[in-house]
Amino acid sequence: MKSEFRGNVEMKTPILVGISAVLLLGAAEAYAELQDKSIGSSAENIRPNSIACAQERGEVQSQCSYRIKRDEKGTTTVTVVFANGFKRKLFFKDGMFLKASVTMSGVGTDTNWSLKDGTHMIRVDDQRYEVPDTLVAAN
């Protein structure tokens, strides 16, 4: 009798562990979903998936992916990635466009920008970018 009971306990333990893991994973996913939908002051909640961009003069704008990096000094770097893999970094300080990175296509000093209806309209060399202010505004 003792060995049968022991066998049942050994058999039930992995099942209980599995059920516990599923319940914990479900709770974690539900919590993450609530965090995604929660209303907050963070610009992270209203980030677009891509930004408008054009790589060549006269080219119709398309969509580029991007990455954002912020430092403790109030500088935000938006790295824009074109469909062909070309990347350019756009540097902002306190919500204002400062400069662009040097690339093979230009030194990034021939620039023009304005803030229109919450969007930074930026031209660097022959490239154009439309960066929503929510991406560069301080958290």
Image (tube, rainbow, N blue to C red):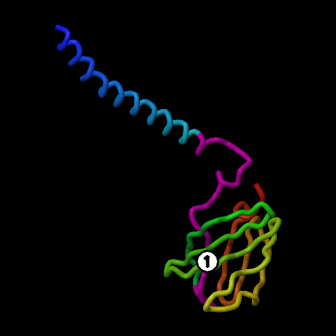
Q: Quadrant of residue 124?
A: bottom right
Q: Is residue 84 magenta?
A: no
Q: Which quarter of the image is occupied by the C terminus?
A: bottom right
Towards the viewer: 52 or 106? 106
Residue bounds of the magenta highlight: 35-59
The answer to whether 49 is drawn above or below residue 13 in the figure is: below
Q: Residue at x 49, y 81 (%)?
A: 84
Query: Mark 1 packing: few (<14 Cα in 10 Å), some, or many (20+)?
Result: many
Q: To which residue does mark 1 refer?
A: 53
Q: For the residue labelled by badge 1, is the local secondary structure a helix, a strand or a loop?
A: strand
24 on left or right of 46: left
Residue at 40%, 28% in the rendered image: 20
Q: Is residue 50 above or below residue 12?
A: below
Rendered view: 136 above or below 56? above
Q: Nearer the viewer, residue 5 or 68?
A: 5
Q: Quadrant of residue 99?
A: bottom right
Q: Position of residue 22 (x, y in %)?
A: 39, 33
Q: Residue at x 20, y 9 (%)?
A: 2
What percent of the width, then of the height, locates residue 106? 66, 91
Q: Whole-percent x and y of residue 93?
A: 81, 69
Q: Tell me, yes or no, whether the highlighted magenta stretch contains residue 39.
A: yes
The one of 37 and 19 positioned closer to us in this rendering = 19
Dot 1 amino acid type: Cys
